């Protein structure tokens, strides 16, 4: 009896060792994935220390060899082909893993809070309309389950799947429409990684060391309070949902977030650009970062939305970034969740097509305030990105105000002359400043002739009261 017990124990131990010795892969390295085309991409995982692993890629029959390190981890770089597929990747060690239906194409992260998270299950009409024809083997989706962690993790809960009507019930609508347009225009497979969580502040997506090592960001983070539905501590979503996939080569990032940082808008530009830099450092790439300016909404505190939008626009001075303006597609300013995700996704895609893929035929540059000149009782406003000029839609301009040195703003009149906006008011004889659509709920009617709305702006730097 005693010998049988020892034999059983030995067999169980052998089984445990055998299981432990097997090659194991993170979830993001799996069948159905999209690898960034024509790149050196990393494959990684775990196995028995000292175990030799061979990796064979079907597109060129190249064999890569790697030996597992003493910490049981291994990684190697492989060369990916031009966009196409499906391909297979075979890994052999003490066990064999065959990854099938692998594509080479363009891979993008889609991240942020609820306006990025919104999906078919939210009742979005633009998703419901597309679902019957949503099946597309050239769009692959990887939705990361919500999780938090105090320290960076090694893996996430997710799986690569082919886009279809069921996937769109839970996958980011903005991300899907972004990827769909890229697929339509580039004619290559698109991989989309959805890491989003409604109600989150940017701090939770930023490595905690980035926040805690900066006095301004550290203090601002104390004002982000728990709401019972999402995390609020710096870095916790980054650690659990993004850090595990930073080895995965991507083309860029789309981002829709900001509503939960309106209470700390003064620090948002520093926070957002620091977050971008931290992501780029983690991926070892100057990642394109295209983001959505938050939509008009009736916040409880005065001007906080306008100030956050201003911080977002200022963030465009950071290299390789771009911003989508949404004032014209908002709809209901009493709903923080605009339902038009189709146009948001396509406008993000236009930024990528124009800047990342150098397809300049796409319209993506929004007219932005450049400078002002005072000429007697009028202010002349000029714009960037207005090569085709600007126009007022309607009989008169909306949400435009002018002030003198007393800082009292009055409704203004305006006309377009030589691609500039000439602004005046009979109430202000000596103008000093102009504001356009600068409030929480303002929806203006000033557009570039390219069809895109002029971003809200102000020419002054006066304190904008929030109480």
Image (cartoon, grey):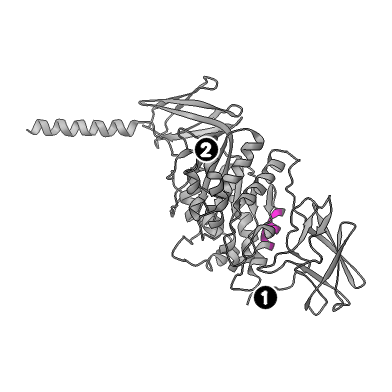
Range of the magenta residues? 310-316
Res 284 → quadrant? top right
The residue labelled by disc 1 is 465
| Residue depicted at x 65% and y 64% | 296
- Contact? badges 1 and 2 (CB < 8 Å): no
Say few, some or many: other residues with alpha carbon within 10 Å of mark 1 (under 14 / 14 to 19 / 20 or more).
few
Residue 394 painted magenta: no
Task: Tell which circle, 1 or 2, labels the residue nearer the N-terminal end.
Answer: 2
User: Quick one: 86 or 39, which is closer to the camera?
Assistant: 86
Q: Is residue 9 above or below residue 246?
A: above
Is 57 placed left or right of 412 in the picture? Answer: left
Visible residue check, residue 207: no
Residue 315 painted magenta: yes
The number of callouts visible is 2
Is 365 placed left or right of 112 in the picture? Answer: right
In percent of width and height, residue 352 lies at 67, 43
User: Quick one: 168 or 379, which is closer to the camera?
Assistant: 168
Q: Which mark is residue 134?
A: none
In percent of width and height, residue 249 lies at 56, 38
Quadrant the N terminus occupies? top left
Which dot, 1 or 2, sits closer to the camera?
2
Q: Residue 135 carries which label?
A: 2
Quadrant the C terminus occupies? bottom right
Q: What element carries label 2?
A: loop
In percent of width and height, residue 282 lies at 56, 45
| Residue depicted at x 48% and y 29% | 101
């Amino acid at each position: 009896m005693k010998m049988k017990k020892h034999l059983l124990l030995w067999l169980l131990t052998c089984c445990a060792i055998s299981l432990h010795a097997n090659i194991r892969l993170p979830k993001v390295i799996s069948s159905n994935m999209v690898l960034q085309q024509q790149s050196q991409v990393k494959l990684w995982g775990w196995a028995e220390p000292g175990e030799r692993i061979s990796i064979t890629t079907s597109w060129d029959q190249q064999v890569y060899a790697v030996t597992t390190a003493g910490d049981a981890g291994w990684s190697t770089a492989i060369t990916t082909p031009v966009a196409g597929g499906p391909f297979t990747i075979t890994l052999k060690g003490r066990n064999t893993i065959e990854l099938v239906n692998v594509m080479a194409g363009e891979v993008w992260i889609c991240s942020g809070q609820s306006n990025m998270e919104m999906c078919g299950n939210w009742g979005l009409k633009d998703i419901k309309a597309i679902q019957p024809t949503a099946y597309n083997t050239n769009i692959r989706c990887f939705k990361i389950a919500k999780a938090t962690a105090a320290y960076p993790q090694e893996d996430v809960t997710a799986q690569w799947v082919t886009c279809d009507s069921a996937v769109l019930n839970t996958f980011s609508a903005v991300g899907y429409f972004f990827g769909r347009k890229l697929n339509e225009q580039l004619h290559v497979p698109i991989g989309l990684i959805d890491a989003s969580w409604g109600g989150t502040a940017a701090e939770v997506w930023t490595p905690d060391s980035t926040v805690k090592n900066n006095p301004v960001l550290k203090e601002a983070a104390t004002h982000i309070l728990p709401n019972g539905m999402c995390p609020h501590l710096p870095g916790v979503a980054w650690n659990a949902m993004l850090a595990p996939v930073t080895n995965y080569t991507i083309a860029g990032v789309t981002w829709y977030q900001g509503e939960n940082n309106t209470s700390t808008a003064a620090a948002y530009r520093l926070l957002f650009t620091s977050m971008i830099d931290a992501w780029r450092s983690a991926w070892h790439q100057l990642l394109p970062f295209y983001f959505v300016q938050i939509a008009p909404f009736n916040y409880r505190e005065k001007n906080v939305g306008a100030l956050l939008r201003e911080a977002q626009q200022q963030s465009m001075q950071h290299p390789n970034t771009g911003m989508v303006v949404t004032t014209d597609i908002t709809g209901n300013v009493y709903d923080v969740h605009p339902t038009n995700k189709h146009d948001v996704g396509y406008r993000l895609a236009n930024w990528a097509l124009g800047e990342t893929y150098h397809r300049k035929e796409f319209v993506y540059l929004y007219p932005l305030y450049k400078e002002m000149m005072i000429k007697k009782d009028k202010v002349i406003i000029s714009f960037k990105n207005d090569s085709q000029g600007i126009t007022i839609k309607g009989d008169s301009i909306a949400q435009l105000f002018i002030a003198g040195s007393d800082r009292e703003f009055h409704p203004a009149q305006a006309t377009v002359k030589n691609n500039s906006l000439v602004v005046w008011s009979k109430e202000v004889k000596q103008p000093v400043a102009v504001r356009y659509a600068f409030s929480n709920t303002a929806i203006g009617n000033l557009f570039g002739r390219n069809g895109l709305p002029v971003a809200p702006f102000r020419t002054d730097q006066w304190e904008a009261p929030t109480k």
